[in-house]
Amino acid sequence: MTTRLRRREIVTALTVGALFGGGLLVSGMANPSKVLAFLDIFGDWDPSLALVMASAVAVGVIGFTLGSQRAESALGLTMRMPTARDVDIRLVMGSLIFGVGWGLAGLCPGPALVALATGSAKAVTFAASMLLGMAVFEWFRKGDGK
């Protein structure tokens, strides 16, 4: 990979990351109390994040549809689309753990990283726990040969 292409890749990643982080802040997804109010469907429910999620799904569907039709990205890099289609116990358990963590903390990984910039103790605790969980996963994964 040429140095010029690598620089373009880094600038693109930083730009897209900043746009994503800004969107999370503007939408309220980095605010745990707003997320918890959205998840509280039997209490004081705040449905405003439903539009944010619907928009994210629409952008994802468009992106994956267009991406699957291309052999290389706009930067000239090889497209690497997900190929796994299996629903196994690891996927189900991981989804359950993710959902419980999101429901308890009001944060998921992207918004937690954005909230770190605010210095929130909750975001710091969540991010540290997330990193610990990743390390534990890798430790177990090495044990099962995957």
Image (tube, rainbow, N blue to C red):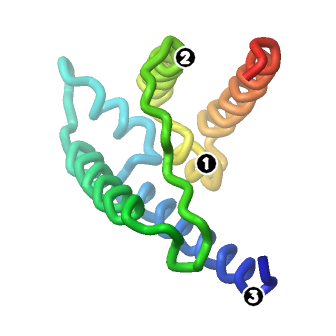
Q: Position of residue 49 (x, y in %)?
A: 27, 45
- In the image, residue 47 lies at what x, y percent? 19, 39
Residue 113 bears which disc, if any?
Answer: 1
Q: At x 46% / y 28%, what residue is drawn?
A: 102
Give the mark nearest the N terminus, 1 or 3: 3
- 95 w.r.t. 85: above or below: above
Asked whether the beta carbons under mark 1 and mark 2 sit within 8 Å of each other, the answer is no
Say which residue label 2 marks: 90
Category of crowding for the residue at label 1, using alpha-carbon neighbours closer than 10 angstroms: few (below 14), some (14–19), many (at least 20): some
Query: Circle 3 — which element?
Result: helix
Q: Residue at x 43, y 31 (%)?
A: 85
- Between 11 and 128, the one lying in front of the other is 11
Query: Could you give the CA–CA distance between mark 1 and mark 2, rounded to whole angstroms?
Result: 24 Å
SS label for mark 2: helix
Q: Secondary structure at mark 1?
A: helix
Q: Position of residue 66 (x, y in %)?
A: 34, 65
